[in-house]
Image (tube, helix red, strand yellow):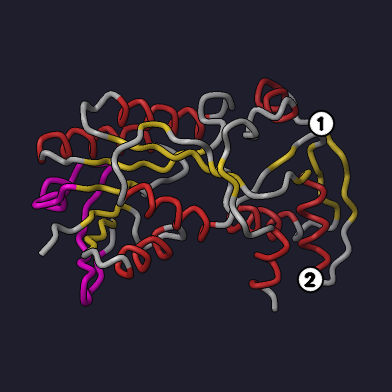
Amino acid sequence: MTTPILVTGGTGTLGSHVVPLLREAGHDVRVLSRHGRASEEGVEYVTADLLKGEGIEAALAGVETVLHLAGGPKGDDEATRNLVRAASRAGVRHLVYISVTGADAIPLGYFRAKLGAERAVADSGLPWTTLRAAQFHDLVLKMAQGMAKLPVIPVPGGLRFQPVDSRDVAARLVELTLAKPAGLVPDLTGPTVHTLTDLLTTYLKTQGKRRLLLPVHMPGKAGRAYRAGDNLSFTNTTVGKRTWEDFLADQFR
């Protein structure tokens, strides 16, 4: 019998794809989340709070591999430090972390927290692998749905994105989790670079909606970083297969 792979955030968008793939590969999975759930064959659910540092030791009992997917709008760095400290004490042999493309370049709190979490993993003394991925199609869809509620949509000019499908990210993470620790691996992005206008226009078309798109200027350091393409990755990059159009077709068929 193999030891279970601990997946933090295993009930989220990415985790819902990762857990079945790990099971298909023949591995038992222990899912850590803040809310309890009844366990099922091959999947054990445990309750813990990474940000508060509660319940982590119990979740790590008998675990050699950790896939850290849990994240939120803030506090990812502190939550990851709590996980890393407990994983070090538990003798974990491989810690895999999902970060975001541009973590070291975009001057926004979310990206800074992701970079802090990356550093916590790299400095942990544990064997580790970190994958940076572009924004998921799921997140772009939520953004588009929210913006489409307005009769006139302000659209910051010069912003480009490489949205990636969460299923492509899940498959890559499972591959990395079952391989040897590899450090910081090439970024994973979607196959196409889109402007924000492209993304919104395509979404509106699927809904049969018309909206006036009003170009606006995104000020400050963050605006300059986005216009410079610091959130994009082109060199030594792994590219997913499913496009934004493929994703939308699946969502609204």
Specify the quadrant that holds the N terminus. Answer: bottom left
State left or right for residue 185 relative to residue 23: right
- The answer to whether 234 is drawn above or below residue 140 in the figure is above
Residue at mark 2: 207
- The answer to whether 24 is drawn above or below residue 179 in the figure is below
Specify the quadrant that holds the C terminus. Answer: bottom right
Q: Callout 1: few (<14), some (14-19), or many (20+) C-alpha neighbours within 10 Å?
A: few
Q: Amino acid at mark 2?
A: Gln
- The magenta stretch spans residue 239: no
**Could you say where residue 126 lies in the image, as x and y percent from the top left?**
21, 32
Q: CA distance from mark 2 to mark 1?
A: 27 Å
**Could you say where residue 165 lies in the image, as x and y percent from the top left?**
58, 57
**Could you say where residue 124 lies in the image, as x and y percent from the top left?**
24, 27
Q: Secondary structure at mark 1?
A: loop
Q: Nearer the viewer, residue 208 or 187?
A: 187
Q: Secondary structure at mark 2?
A: helix
Q: What's drawn in magenta, residue-wise?
A: 36-64
Work out whether mark 2 precedes mark 1 in sequence or the reverse, and give the earlier one: 2
Residue under the image location 35 percent in, 35 percent down:
182
Q: Amino acid at mark 1?
A: His
Residue under the image location 78 percent in, 54 percent down:
200
Q: Please tell me whether mark 2 or mark 1 is closer to you in this view.
A: 2
* Quarter holding residue 147: bottom right
Q: Give the dominant element type of the magenta stretch: helix, strand or loop.
A: loop
Residue at mark 1: 217
* Quarter holding residue 157: top right
